[in-house]
Amino acid sequence: MAIFKHLFLVLSLVPLVLSYPFFPPTCYSKVLSMARDLTQMAADLKRGHETSYCMAHMPDLYLDVHNACVMHKMRTYISLVEGLRDRRCAYTREVMKLGYTLRQLFIFMSEKCHGDLVFTIYDCAVLERYPGY
């Protein structure tokens, strides 16, 4: 009977162990993923039915985490999102989520991953003319 209990315990733990990711996300992979998501989120808000009229004047957001100008671009975009005054747009859940997540990424890159990230280029014009993914 004890053998069956041990066998049952082992068989129930095997799927849990196999489903656990072997490689935890690194700081770089987290930043890269968040930047892609934010770029897509901003593009969706510019095209969205409820938010397109107030997001139309916002610049396109493209976040290249390898570009040293990305920190300035994020600071500028955060201030623009916080400066939206149209209540029907500025206080929608999606726009607030964009601002909050962008602020999270900024803090993550500047404080949490400061030593892990390497900026390979310094070209601010690339961030301005790239229309998104």
Image (cartoon, helix red, strand yellow):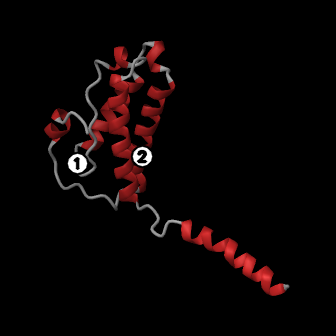
Residue that lies at the very extreme toward the right in this rendered image = 1
Q: Quadrant of the N terminus?
A: bottom right
Q: Residue at x 30, y 18 (%)?
A: 56
Q: Is residue 52 left or right of residue 25?
A: left
Occupied quadrant, residue 14: bottom right
Residue 86 versus residue 7: which sits nearer the camera?
A: 7
| x and y percentages locating residue 75 in the rendered image | 33, 35
Residue 110 versus residue 132: which sits nearer the camera?
A: 132
| x and y percentages locating residue 99 in the rendered image | 43, 32
Q: Say which mark, if any, is on residue 107.
A: 2
Disc nearer the start of the sequence (2/1)? 1
Residue 116 versus residue 18: which sits nearer the camera?
A: 18
Q: Which amino acid type is shown beneath numbered disc 2? A: Ile
Helix, strand or loop at mark 1: loop
Q: Residue at x 42, y 50 (%)?
A: 108
Q: Is residue 130 above or below residue 117?
A: above
Q: Residue at x 24, y 36 (%)?
A: 132
Q: Quadrant of the C terminus?
A: top left
Q: Is residue 18 left or right of residue 13?
A: left
| x and y percentages locating residue 68 in the rendered image | 23, 48
Q: Which amino acid type is shown beneath numbered disc 1? A: Ala
Occupied quadrant, residue 114: bottom left
Q: Is residue 105 above or below residue 118?
A: above
| x and y percentages locating residue 90 in the rendered image | 45, 19
Q: Is residue 60 above or below residue 72?
A: above
Mark 2 and mark 1: span between their CA atoms?
Answer: 15 Å
Task: Count the numbered circles shown.
Answer: 2
Q: Is residue 121 left or right of residue 10?
A: left
Crowd rating for badge 2 (residues with CA inside 10 Å; few <14, some 14–19, many 20+): some
Residue to which mark 1 is pinned:
68
